Image (cartoon, rainbow, N blue to C red):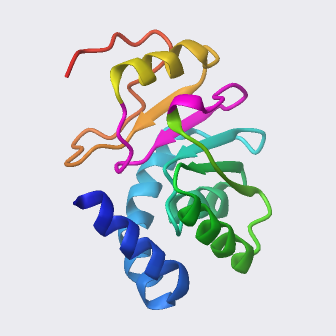
Amino acid sequence: MFVLITKIYEYLASWFPFFITLQMKYYKKLVQKELALMDLRISDRILFIGGGAAPISAALYHQNSGVEVHVIDHDPWMVVSAKRYMKKRAYDRVHVRCGALKDVDVTGYTHIVIAKQVTVDKACLTRILKDIAPATKVLVRRKNQKNLGFGLTRTTELVAG
C-alpha cells in the first residue's frame, strides 16, 4: 500500500509544483544528512535505485554537489514522468532510465542509494555487493531509519531477515 500511495503522490508531484514543495521539505533534510556522509567529489557518480516519477533526491544530490547521478526505476510510467521532471529543470547530469534491480549494472559508481520503496532481497543485495568496486558505498533507505549511514560495503556480512 505504501508503494502505491508513493507512486501516486510522486506522479502528481511531477505535474503540480505544490506537491514538489511538500516533498522537498522531507527530502531536503534527508539528502543533507546523506550528503554529509558521502564526502563527494565532482568526479563521483551516484546510482539512485527507485527514483519514482519525481526523483527529488537525485535532483538534490546533483544540485548540492554537482555530481553525476543515474536514476533507475522498474516502472516505465515513472521513468517517463521522471525524465520530464528532469528535463523541465535542466539537470543535464541526472540521467533516468528503466531497469530492474536484479539486472542493474552497478559497476562504475562510487555511491549507490536504494530508495525506501524498493524491495531488496538478500540474493539481490549480495550480487550488488559482489559486483561493486571495493570503495563503493551503498545506502539502503529503510522505514524508521535511526542511524543513517553507509553501513554496507563489499565486505558486509548480510544478516537474514
Residue found 38% across the figure and 26% down from its top: 151
Residue 43 left/right relative to 122: right
Residue 11 left/right relative to 67: left
Residue 105 belongs to the span the image colors magenta: yes
Place residue 105 in its image quadrant.
Answer: top right
Residue 104 belongs to the span the image colors magenta: yes
Quarter of the image with the C terminus in it:
top left
Place residue 42 in its image quadrant.
Answer: top right
User: Does 152 appear above or below 158?
Assistant: below
Q: Residues in magenta? A: 102-120
Residue found 78% across the figure and 39% down from its top: 43
Place residue 134 in its image quadrant.
Answer: top right
Residue 93 left/right relative to 51: right
Q: Nearer the viewer, residue 90 or 31?
A: 90
Residue found 53% across the figure and 49% down from its top: 74
Quarter of the image with the N terminus in it:
bottom left
Q: How many marks?
A: 0
Give how far across and how far down residue 46 sits, in percent.
63, 42
User: Does 73 appear above or below 86?
Assistant: above
User: Does 80 appear above or below 100?
Assistant: below
Give how far across and how far down residue 97 sits, in percent.
67, 52
